[in-house]
């Protein structure tokens, strides 16, 4: 009689254990705001490869987050990651209807002059006037060598009085002799706008005295 092999029952395959990054990303959706905030802070100190993978999850979390402390931690982590993708997420906040989020994103972007430079050209020609004005606000304290150049290009091309007025406000403190032509052309384009005339004449007068 042939011997029959007794087959041991096979153990059910277990799902792979989540890695540390997956666990941290999952915590961004935790019910406890303190856990979400801690997860965002942890990602800021993670390895660069993990940070790059985390940016989409951070962007998604930011879209739904209502706790300012958690949102602040997410913005800080995106700024710490400082890649083109993370900076683009910060720039996207300029379209938010939440004034707190817009202002917090502006502060984060102001601290990243080198990383902001590639997106600034797009922000300053955005279809939305409010985004262009907020972009000018970023330039107000952005420590970048091209700030004056960007603002002069803006006032030479933008047709919105409010945008140009915001640009003149920033130029008032930083303009060099290169601003003469663009400012004079701006005043010629808007001869009947009192504020532009006031701000433009003030700026040109300062340059004459320099």
Image (cartoon, grey):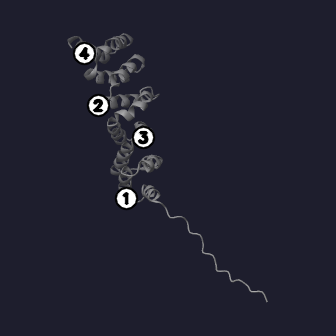
The disc, 4 or 3, on the residue closer to the chain's N-terminal end is 3
Q: Name the residue under label 2.
A: 141
Q: Mark 1 points at which residue?
A: 35
Do the residues bearing badges 4 and 3 touch, measured as CB atoms within 8 Å? no
Q: Is mark 4 on a helix, strand or loop?
A: helix
* Residue at the limit of the structure toward the left, as seen here: 209
Looking at the image, residue 59 lies above or below residue 191: below
Q: Is mark 3 on a helix, strand or loop?
A: loop
- Give the residue at x 37% y 47%: 77
Mark-to-mark CA distance, 4 and 3: 39 Å
Q: Name the residue under label 4.
A: 202
Give x and y (percent) for residue 96.
41, 39
Quarter of the figure that contains the N terminus = bottom right
The disc, 2 or 1, on the residue closer to the chain's N-terminal end is 1
The disc, 2 or 4, on the residue closer to the chain's N-terminal end is 2
The disc, 3 or 1, on the residue closer to the chain's N-terminal end is 1
Quarter of the figure that contains the C terminus = top left
Crowd around label 2: few <14 · some 14–19 · many ≥20 (10 Å)? some
- Give the residue at x 37% y 59%: 35
């Amino acid at each position: 009689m042939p011997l029959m092999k007794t087959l041991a029952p096979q153990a059910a395959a277990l799902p792979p254990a989540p890695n540390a990054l997956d666990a941290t990303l999952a915590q961004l959706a935790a019910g406890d705001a303190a856990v979400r905030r801690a997860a965002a802070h942890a990602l800021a100190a993670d390895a660069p490869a993990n940070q790059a993978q985390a940016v989409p999850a951070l962007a998604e979390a930011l879209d739904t987050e209502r706790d300012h402390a958690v949102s602040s931690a997410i913005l800080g982590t995106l700024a710490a990651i400082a890649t083109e993708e993370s900076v683009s997420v910060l720039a996207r906040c300029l379209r938010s209807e939440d004034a707190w989020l817009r202002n917090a994103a502006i502060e984060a972007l102001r601290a990243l002059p080198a990383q902001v430079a590639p997106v600034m050209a797009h922000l300053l020609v955005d279809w939305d006037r409010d985004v262009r004005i907020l972009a000018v606000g970023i330039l107000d304290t952005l420590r970048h060598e091209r700030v004056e150049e960007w603002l002069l290009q803006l006032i030479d091309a933008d047709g919105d009085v409010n945008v140009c007025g915001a640009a003149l406000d920033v130029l008032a403190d930083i303009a060099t002799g290169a601003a003469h032509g663009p400012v004079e052309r701006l005043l010629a384009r808007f001869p009947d706008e009192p504020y532009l005339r006031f701000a433009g004449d003030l700026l040109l007068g300062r340059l004459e005295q320099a």
